[in-house]
Amino acid sequence: MNRWLLFALLLTGLGLAAYPRLHRRLVRFQSHRAAEAATAQVAPQMRDGDLIFHTSQSAQSQAIQLATHSAWSHCGILYQQAGRWQVFEAVQPVKLTPLADWVARGQGGHFVTKRLRDAATALTPAALTHLKAAGQPLLGHSYDLYFGWSDDRIYCSELIWKVYERGLHRRLGQLQQLRDFDLSHPVVQAKLKERYGDQLPLNETVISPVSIFNSHELVTVLNR
């Protein structure tokens, strides 16, 4: 018998309420199995260079959603390596993450993928090589909690914007300044206070996940 199935049956018999840590592990396992099934089903519709978005369960996700008036709080670039789909993303650190792992981290396993409108002609093998090469220097960089525009640290939508701009000279989404977002909600203000104290960098250049998501250069491919 599969050891995880045996583990699940054992927990059911003992009563999950008495074992909260084991219960959380079982929930994560079930979420990952569901993500594996979902991504395997739609994998044939994906292409290298597609963008993927979801609602993160990270501590700052709610603040991002409120400030940008959008559910999308995390995003990455899809690449296929050795027959497996990976997400090039800015977390801690910038890295490639197996697609099923990435999907399982989102709320409800829901995700959307986007693609360049002219991908059939724009995303040639040579172009994809340029795209991947543009991201290579950023691999391993620390995540940017302060959403600065330098390359010292990188956040998720910044990674996408810079890789596409440097690799293909395509600017996805509208660059904004921190002052352009809705900073009025108490949750947002608390997160800003935590990060910046009383010195808000209101003129800092920022690119949000939803700005890329809404780019006219992109079309929706999958909505799962």
Image (cartoon, helix red, strand yellow):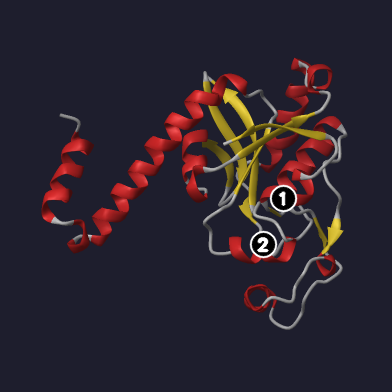
Query: Is the Cβ of the residue at disc 1 closer than 8 Å to that at disc 2?
Result: yes
Residue with the mark numbered 1: 209
In-front residue for pair 171/163:
171
Sequence-wise, the earlier of marks 1 and 2 is 2
Residue at 61% across / 53% down in the picture?
142
Q: Amino acid at mark 2?
A: Ile
Disc 1 residue type (three-letter): Pro
Residue 111, position as x, y percentages in the image: 58, 41
Expressed as whole percent of the image width and height from the top left, the position of residue 95 reads: 58, 41
Q: Is residue 111 above or below residue 17?
A: above
The answer to which image quadrant residue 123 occupies is: top right
Residue 200: numbered disc: none
Furthest-front residue in view?
223
What element does badge 2 sit on? Answer: helix
**Residue 140 as seen in the image, left or right of residue 168:** left
Q: CA distance from mark 1 to mark 2?
A: 9 Å
* Residue found 71% across the figure and 54% down from its top: 152
